[in-house]
Image (cartoon, rainbow, N blue to C red):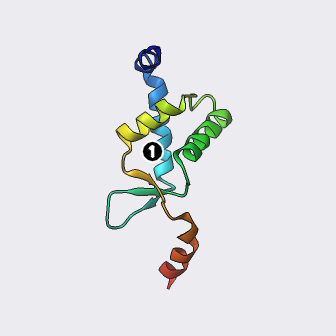
Amino acid sequence: GNKNRALKRRNDKTSESVLAWFHELILTADKMPDTVDYMLPAQSKQAVYKWYMADVAQHPTVYRPVSKPYFNRLWRQYFPYVKLRKYLRFTKVSAVVSCE
């Protein structure tokens, strides 16, 4: 419908904004030693989208606002290896174990 056409007409600078943000985000993510994956300390994709929109508000000349479906589509398409940590409540335990 109209939504899909609107998504296709997106300015390249808008997608570049999201992609640049993900490149920055990866620098703070946990790289998994045995895979190509990066883990984010977030419970949902909604939380990650909120992080992005907070950065849009803080740096409006750097990042451009996007819809959540568009953000998630770019994430799926370009950053499938950036994943949510499934067991956040065990993060503290695994941090202690890894320090030994």
In the figure, is residue 71 to the left or right of 77?
Answer: right
In the figure, is residue 90 to the left or right of 2?
Answer: right
Frontmost residue, 96 versus 87: 87
Residue 91, position in %: x, y?
54, 69
Is 94 located above or below residue 44 in the figure? below
Is 45 located above or below residue 61 in the figure? below
Mark 1 residue crowding within 10 angstroms, few (<14) / some (14–19) / many (20+): few
Q: Amino acid at mark 1?
A: His
Q: Which residue is mark 1?
A: 23
> Which residue, as the protein is rendered here, is positioned at the far right?
58
Residue 97, position in %: x, y?
50, 81
Q: Quadrant of residue 64?
A: top right
Frontmost residue, 46 versus 39: 46
Q: Residue at x 47, y 18 (%)?
A: 3
Q: Residue at x 47, y 30 (%)?
A: 70
Q: Residue at x 65, y 39 (%)?
A: 54
Residue 45, position in %: x, y?
52, 45
Is 55 located above or below residue 70 in the figure? below
